[in-house]
Image (tube, coloured by chain):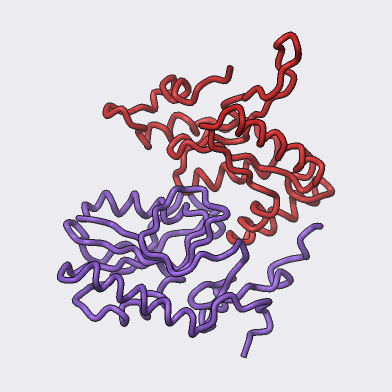
Amino acid sequence: MIHADVEDVLLTGEEIQARVAELGAQLAADYEGRDPVLVSVLKGSIIFLADLVRAMPMPLSIDLMEVSSYGASTESSGQVRILKDLSSSIAGREVIVVEDIIDTGLTLNYLLRYLHDKGPASIRICCLLDKPARRLAPIEIDYRGFTIPDRFVIGYGLDYGQHYRNLPYVGVLRPSVYGPAEPA
Amino acid sequence: MWISRRAILGFDGAIGPTGRYDRGAVAATLTKSSPRFAHQSEAELARILDFYGVAWRYEPDIFPISWNADGAVVESFAPDFYLPEIDLYLELTTLRQALVRKKNRKLRWLHQLYPEVRVKLFYARDFRALMVKYRRLDFLADVAAMNGNGPLDDR
């Protein structure tokens, strides 16, 4: 059943699950015997993370971070803030940053600088969706699920106004949901 | 000839002791004073870059792109932003198709004359998508109300 606010289904649940299984197998092979820590960024990435780790039959640990977003913080200090920090040290650990989507790359760019200062042995990036059209920060993605076109997507963890995260697929949000039609 | 980015960064003291860009120094020296932006959308993009700690400069370089028979510059291109840490120029562009075509033409000439210079065009639809992402549709509405048109449409 497609949600009424979804204009188009970009990736079905089956396509996502198949690709996540491939990514998990690849990560498991690459990190065999290395006990990596997967660091995910709240809130959008948790569904991807939950599926990904279950596709990685190996010793690993997970940790979660949350950072403030520009739109929600225009009244505050004017700088990104860590809302939830790592629970454990990553010094000397093999870190895999797990992201749901990389768009401008600004948030991840900030996070990578922050994580590098914690002294990990290595940091690699695994993202489900890569939307390169509007990239403003250089990000080297090591594990990529799908490259997607420049459309506003929701579902499988991705939200608009905190809604739609529970959709099992990735869909394009109808523009009428977030504002008047785009000028011609 | 245009002023080199290295000259700008060297002048600003943004090169650290290792010879690489010192991020903190870049951000502090390049963005400490707010320039006079030509459009509210440019100011908003600057605030976003500041928020995420990305250093920028506003219109630091002017690239001549055509000359008359006497060798005088008759047309030039000054990208809106320069991001020194990734050596990238950003140009915000317009909703009006005629101006988009003009800017695209300038960009083609720039690429031919200065192939080493990286410029990313940020179209009005890209900016609008950014505002949707950050739930800043109120900003778009304010700009439209102020100008009687869309973002970047009055340039």
Residue B36 placement (x, y as % from top left)? 65, 31
Colour of chain A, in one word, is purple
Q: Please tell me which residue lies in front, B54 or B119.
A: B119
Colour of chain B, in one word, is red
Note whether A184 is above or below B77 in the view shown. Answer: below
Q: Quadrant of the C terminus of chain B?
A: top right
Count of marks, rendered view: 0
Which residue is depicted at the point 67% across and 79% down? A5
Residue B134 placement (x, y as % from top left)? 58, 59
Question: In the displayed structure, does residue B62 sit left or right of residue B140?
Answer: left
Residue B89 placement (x, y as % from top left)? 56, 37
Note whether A76 is above or below B23 in the view shown. Answer: below
Q: Quadrant of the N terminus of chain B?
A: top right
Q: Please tell me which residue lies in front, A116 or A64.
A: A116
Which residue is depicted at the point 69% across and 53% down? B139
Residue A163 placement (x, y as % from top left)? 57, 77
Which residue is depicted at the point 67% across and 55% down? B128
Note whether A139 is above or below B1 in the view shown. Answer: below
Residue B21, by quadrant, is top left
Note whether B37 is above or below A128 in the view shown. Answer: above
**For the view shown, which residue lies furthest in the bottom direction?**
A1
Which residue is depicted at the point 48% across and 85% down? A14
Q: Please tell me which residue lies in front, B110 or B16.
A: B110
Residue A47, by quadrant, is bottom left
Question: In the displayed structure, does residue A34 sit left or right of residue A127?
Answer: left
**For the view shown, which residue lies furthest in the top direction?**
B70
